[in-house]
Amino acid sequence: MSGFRIAGVGAALPDKILTNNDLKEFMDTSDEWIKERTGISERRVGSSTLELATNAALQAIERSHLEASQIENIVLATTTPEQLCPGTAPAVANNLGIQCGAFDVQAACAGWVYGLMVANGLLLQGAKNVLLIGAEALDKITDFTDRGTGILFGNGGAATILEASEDATGKILAWDLDSNGALGSILYADHGSNFHMEGREVFKKAVTVIESSVNKVLREADVKPADIKLVVPHQANIRIIELAWRKLGFTMDQTATVLERTGNTSAASIPIALEEAVTEGRVEPGDLVLFVGFGAGMTWASALIEWDAP
Ligand code: COA
């Protein structure tokens, strides 16, 4: 292939909204406190990783020129697979009525960017297309009575179809995948348990790794912050984004954010924000788009792409 196009995007959120005021029933908190410290007003709960992944995939396929039967690979980034085993991607394929290469990627909130690099690798090996999904049912591992974590997380899913083509100009210009397992204890969920998190520590480390990872990618691509049309960061906390942006020199006008309405949807957050930006017409072929994810592991990842779409 000489490049890829984003042939379609789709997103799916559960119907049930849990507002900050709803959370007051379960914990001692306030709408003002949560909004000021996180930027989040509400999140979605209910549905399931499989249902959200399937619905997002169906929408992305419907918006593309492809039939489900033409999908060759499904890569699903998730922290909350439908079952411990098997992965959820084969079940998504089954729901779409197809059989194809299908597997999950687990890199927590950086999972979709890791998945993007895996998808790019498949295309470089000759695959015609990859349906890349991020989907989460984080309400399965969130204690909504815990003030530290219950205010942050929500459910959602989104799908992006990458299609290889000889005349496509889309490509990865620079990328960075990284992790530090020594920081595993600041954010984790054991089998059968909810999230445990040292919020302040996660906050500080997140800002540091975003800055270093994005700087590395910009340096490698020889690109300035102002050259980038759209930055799609992991949607964890608006203050993390604002602080990192001040250091990096990005503006909020360049940025896709949905966290006010979704909370942190982990591996689904970047593709959900991307889907909204694309449907609002914020990116055109030739634009530079930057993704940066970070989360439990700790894992983090950045990818700078040149956008192309039909
Ligand atoms: N509502 C009201 N008050 C709360 C509260 C809540 N939900 N959570 C904590 N507080 C109180 C604390 O009890 C504490 O009170 P005190 O000063 O009287 O002791 C005060 O607010 C500060 O608590 P702290 O835990 O230090 O708050 P914080 O400013 O660090 O904010 C987070 C907490 C979770 C919002 C913040 O640490 C954070 O967003 N961290 C990053 C988490 C993240 O993004 N994780 C996912 C990464 S992928």
Image: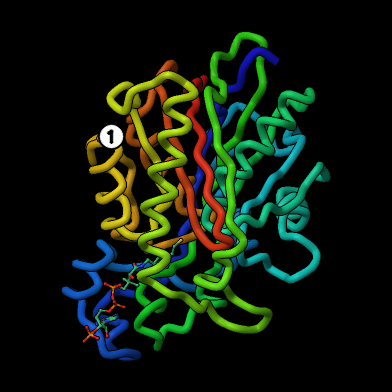
Asked if residue 222 is positioned above or below residue 257 in the image, the reply reads above
Between residue 251 and residue 253, name the one nearer to us: 251
Between residue 212 and residue 175, name the one nearer to us: 212
Tell me the quarter of the image containing the N terminus.
Answer: top right
- Quadrant of res 20: bottom left
- Residue situated furthest left in the rendering: 32
Asked if residue 44 is positioned above or below residue 93 in the image, the reply reads below
Between residue 135 and residue 306, name the one nearer to us: 306
Horizontal side of 141 relative to 210 (left or right) equals: right
Asked if residue 165 is positioned above or below residue 194 in the image, the reply reads above
Q: Name the residue under label 1.
A: 254
- Quadrant of res 228: top left
- Can residue 272 be seen? no
Question: What is the image's colouring?
Answer: rainbow
> Residue at the spot x=41%, y=24% of the render?
288
Q: Tell me which amino acid carries mark 1.
A: Gln
